[in-house]
Structure formats: structure tokens, C-alpha cells
Image (tube, rainbow, N blue to C red):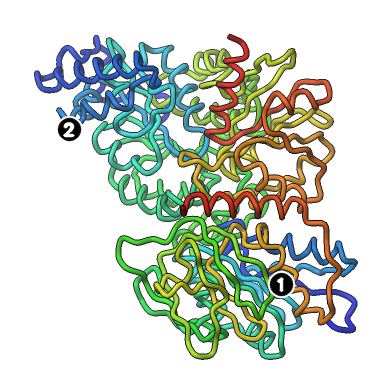
Amino acid sequence: MTGTPVPGQGAGPARGPEALPPRAKLAVTASRVTAAISRRAGKGSGSVIGGKIALRIAPDLLAQLADHLQVVLVSGTNGKTTTTRLVAEALRAAGPVVSNALGANMPAGITSALAGAGDARFGVIEVDEKYLSGVARDADPIAIVLLNLSRDQLDRAAETRMLAEKWREGLRGTEAVLVANADDPLVVWAASSAKDVVWVAAGQMWQEDSWSCPSCGGVMHRPGDDWYCSDCDFRRPQVTWSLVGEEMVDPDGQVWPLDLQLPGRANRANATTAAAVASVFGVDTASALARMKNVTAVAGRYDVVSYRGRNLRLLLAKNPAGWLETFSLIDPAPAPVFLSVNALDADGKDTSWLWDVDFTRLAGRPLFVLGQRRLDLAVRLDVAGLEFSVHDDLAGAVAACPPGQIEVIANYTAFQQLRRTIKEAQA
Amino acid sequence: MIGMSKLRLVWIYPDLLSTYGDQGNALIVERRARLRGIDVERIDVRSDQPVPTSGDIYLIGGGEDRPQRLAAERLRRDPGLGQAVARGATLLAVCAGYQIIGHEFVDDLDRVEPGLGLLDVKSGRGPVGRRCVGEVLADVDPVLGLPPLSGFENHQGVTHLGPGVKPLARVTAGFGNGTDDGSEGAYAGRVIGTYLHGPVMSRNPGLADLLLTWATGVPLTPLEDRWHEQLRAERLKAVRAAAS
């Protein structure tokens, strides 16, 4: 079915929020005013508070706003923001796009982004894993992207398999086309209740959350790239799109080089997924890829910035699967690596996940440890037998660092803090 | 282990019970043994493999409700761990693993599941709406000669201790067994159960040394524990500041 135009979705002029009923219009205005006040007060973009106000006035606002758009939802533990950006770039080949590009991915943030849709034809929306079923119900999407599921902030989030179960229930019978990662058994379990699925071989380095069969509990076997349950018939589905090394193979078997500016295997996987999505919307692969290749950084991630005369590449990694993918894309030894870890509310307050990360992959590099929970990280690296130094702040670490571009890997709030520090120094 | 060339460290079911960085305890025991010149053979037992009976130290970690049930089903069919404990092997079980080695626990289908009965405890569901999540600080039974335990807990279950065990520790912060009597964990002989992950040994290397002492039967040379100690101090300070 890929490559065909979407039925029932005329390509005529989009009707913007002007066509909304009065109550919804009022809600949109209130959301914009609130967001502007919040921005002026220096409290960030204001999109979340604006969206919350709007949803209180018109609880079905998200659905009404989405009604004017051809919507694609993007969810998963890792790669949401980047894939959302890549899909948005690709669909711009076919028309204007509205997107929650900065990652405000719960209903309030999504509503707020859609309220600014203007004459957009496509809505490309990143959705937090926990809210996917609800947003999928409200937004009536054409396509839903399921990237991957792995452990993340277990002290405040749902258990990983429970999330897969919720997706499976929520997406059962959906009219949307699912674009799903065939290499993640939890994603396959979640997606296989839907009737129309485009399977993508997007790969998955982290496998520790799917050793037991989500269907029957049997032990999973993983010879090479394949996987199957030893006790039931649950196994890897036939794929139509594949990431193979540095290249992508489309459903016709045509091979496309993925010379992206975004680094790493995970981003080649995200681009392969985005090309499959573009195809669902009738955007040809050559146009989609050409646009995706222009993306250099996403919400500050992968950005190379200058700080105290040094180049720092900023990499966000929030959970074991993310750290593993990030280790695979950084420059080889002896490139220096900064590691910064916090455990504030937005990170999850439990640091035990550090022990799921195989830090021995960093052996041979100068390692500099930062962040609110730098001592947790120090113990972890010490037990791994690695050499490292611990620093109270970025300036101290940079001063002690040998020459060369510095790879900086940080979890969520640590990443935001580093960006702020660098921005202040540049000002 | 005594008179043997190698310490056999057995990590049970990492495919099911390794949700909260449980590998950390295995890595820390392994490292602290090696730093003292003790040769270690680490054996990771997947849930479709038999548990060896000849281990010196056994570790079981934490997991989500469904893997916990699957692990219990498979361990009940495997006499390996029971035989090892009966001949005096050392066992540390954390969270879901702690519940499994008791007499019973409640599974993901709300059924009472039999455990392995290696520790005289029974686990059930805690009060609705209360999940025990957060930092824990607990004074260890003085008999064991350890400084206060610091760790992180995340569990719905509560564990009631029978006459055959003693509480491992008394909480000064956090929930522990969740039974509102301040108890945390349980131990009897060389078997310890605890709700603390973190993993527990990252902040409490003394616990790793206790297991090693039990397993080797000889006193251990002290180690330079700079990072463990700094982390402990920082966590103790943070928890006490939050409590006051």
C-alpha cells in the first residue's frame, strides 16, 4: 500500500483553525494569550501552560484542531523528537507542516502546537508513550510510528511491557497505518493487533527488555538479525523497508545511501522510518531523503557548539538503550568524552540504570564526569575498571581536557543545564 | 569455596530479573573479590537453563510483575538453588527476587503464587494507591557489623517476616518491607533479602564484603573505597536533608 495517495484525504486547501466552532476558537485565543504571558515572564515557550488552559475550555480541542490536518503520530522510548523532525521535513515536500518540534509531547503541548497550525496541511506530532492511545483516538491519524520500547525512568513511568500492552489495546482496530520497528519484539507485539502495518527493519542495539516473549512468556531466541519465541509462533515479521549498514532498502528493493548530517546508526534508522512514513503520504523517497539530509541538529541534539575555545558536540541520552546507541556514534578514541548525569524529576530519581549501560565501550578515552549525580557515575566507572576524573562544573572539565573535539553525553536535565551554561558563556 | 581455586558467582535469570541495574551487584562482588586476589567464575543463568548447585554466591535481582511470575514458575521446577542454599551457599535476593525466595507472593494476575521457601517471609500487595518509591536509609542489624544501608526502593508489595528470620535493617527513611514496623529486608543463615536496589552494593560495598566473607570463610583485606564512600556520604546527606 506504500506509495499510494491517502484515500479520503483531499489535497484541497486546508481549513485552518478559523473554521473552528466558537468555543474552540476562544480556547485557541486563550492558549495563545497564556503562552505569550508565560514567555514574557521568562518561563519557557509557554506551550504547555497555554495548551492546558485551552483544553480546560474546550476538552475536545485537540480532536477539533487535528480534524483539519492529515496527522502522523510518532512515539517510542528513543528517537521521537528526531524522527518527528525528519518526517516533518520530508512531508514539507508535499505541503505546509505543523509540528511540536520542541518535544512538548503530552496532550497540552500537542494542542498548543496544533493551535498554531495556520494553513498547514500535515500535522507531524511527537507523542509521549503513555499518551499514545488517547492521542491516537482524538487525532484520527493517517499514520502512527512506533519506534521502540525500552526501560526508561522506571521510578515514575509504567513498566515497559505494560506500555506495549497499552499500545496493543489502544491501537487495536485503528484505521491508521502503523509504521513499526520489526526489530523490537515489544513494538511488534504492540503493533500486530492493527490491520495495516508497514514493518521497518530499523534495528535495535538494546535487547535487555525483550528476552521473554511478550505473547507467551517463553524465552526469545535471536540468531543474527532474526528473532523468534521458542514456545509460540510469535516471531519477527516480514519487512518492507530496511536499514542495512549505511544504506536503506525500499519496498522495491532499491538501495538508497543515507548520507545524513545527523550522526549514527539510530538516526539512519529514524530516517528509514521517516522515508516509509513519507511514502504513506505519497512523498517519493528521493524528495524525502533530500530534505532529511538538510537536518543538522534537533532541539540542540548533535549540535557542535563552541565553549571556551573548544568544540563540544552535545549528545542527549536518557536511558540504557539511548546510551548504547550514543556510544556507537561518537568519535573513536582518543577523543575525549564528557559524561553528565542528573536525577531530577524529569530524569527519574533512580540512578540504577547506570549499571545497565556498558561503559567499558569507552575504554581508552579520556573520561570526564559531571552532573548532579557524578558520584553515582564515578562508582559505576570505577567498578568497570575505567580511568576518569570528576569535575564540579563544565569549565573545570574543559580546562583539564586534552585537545580535540569533545563528545558530551548527558541525560535530560543535565543536557539542558549544559546548553544553558554554554549559551550564557557565549552571551 | 574453601580450599577451592575459584569463587563461583551465580547470577540467576538476568533475562527476567534485571530491571533495576541488578547487574551492578554481580559486577561489584566480582570486582571486590578480584581486587583481593580471589579468582571469580561468573555464571549468568538464563531462565531456560538449569541453576548450578555448586555456586558459592547466588544473586537474584528485581523485575516487573510478569517476569517475576515466570521466574518463580521456572525456579520452582529447578531444585538447583534450594540444594545450594541447603549446603550453605550464600544468597542475596533483591525486590522481586526477595519475594520469590519467600513462601508466597502476589503475581501480576492477582494470584497468590508459591515462592521457594528459602526465607521465612510472605509477601502480598500493599495498600491501594501506595507504591513505595524513593530513597531508603536503614540501620543494619548490629550482629552483621555493617554501617547503615543506603539505597533506592520501588515496589508495591509488602513483606511480612516469620519467626525464622530477622529483619536485615530498620529504616530511618523510606518504607523497607512496607509493613509499617520499620523493618527492611530479612536474613537467616547466609540468605539475605532486601528491597534496596541502586544497585544496593554501589552504595553499600560492605554488603558485598559480607557475602564474600561468608562464601570464602576468611577475613578480607580492606580496600580503598574512595568513590563508594563519597557516594555514600553524598546520599546519606541528601536523604537526611530531605527528612529534616
Q: Three-letter amino acid code at disc 2?
A: Pro
* Residue under the point 66% across and 77% down: B91
Quadrant of the rendered image containing residue A194: top left
Residue A109 locus on image (x, y percent)? 33, 28
Instruction: Classify residue B39 as left or right of residue B69.
Output: right
Quadrant of the rendered image containing residue A42: top left
Gap between marks 2 and 1 measured at Cα: 54 Å
Q: Kindly give the residue lying farthest to the front in the view shown.
A: B244
Residue B34 locus on image (x, y percent)? 85, 64
Residue neighbourhood size for the residue with mark 1, other residues' Cα within 10 Å, grouped as few (<14), some (14–19), many (≥20): many
Using the image, name the chain to which the residue with label 2 belongs. Answer: A
* Residue under the point 68% across and 14% down: A306
Instruction: Classify residue A196 as left or right of residue A352.
Output: left
Q: Three-letter amino acid code at disc 1?
A: Val
Disc 2 designates what residue? Answer: A59
Q: Which of B178 and B18 is in front in this view?
A: B178
Disc 1 designates what residue? Answer: B10
Using the image, name the chain to which the residue with label 1 belongs. Answer: B
Q: Is residue A157 above or below residue B93?
A: above
Q: How many labels does the image show?
A: 2
Q: Kindly give the residue lying farthest to the left in the view shown.
A: A22
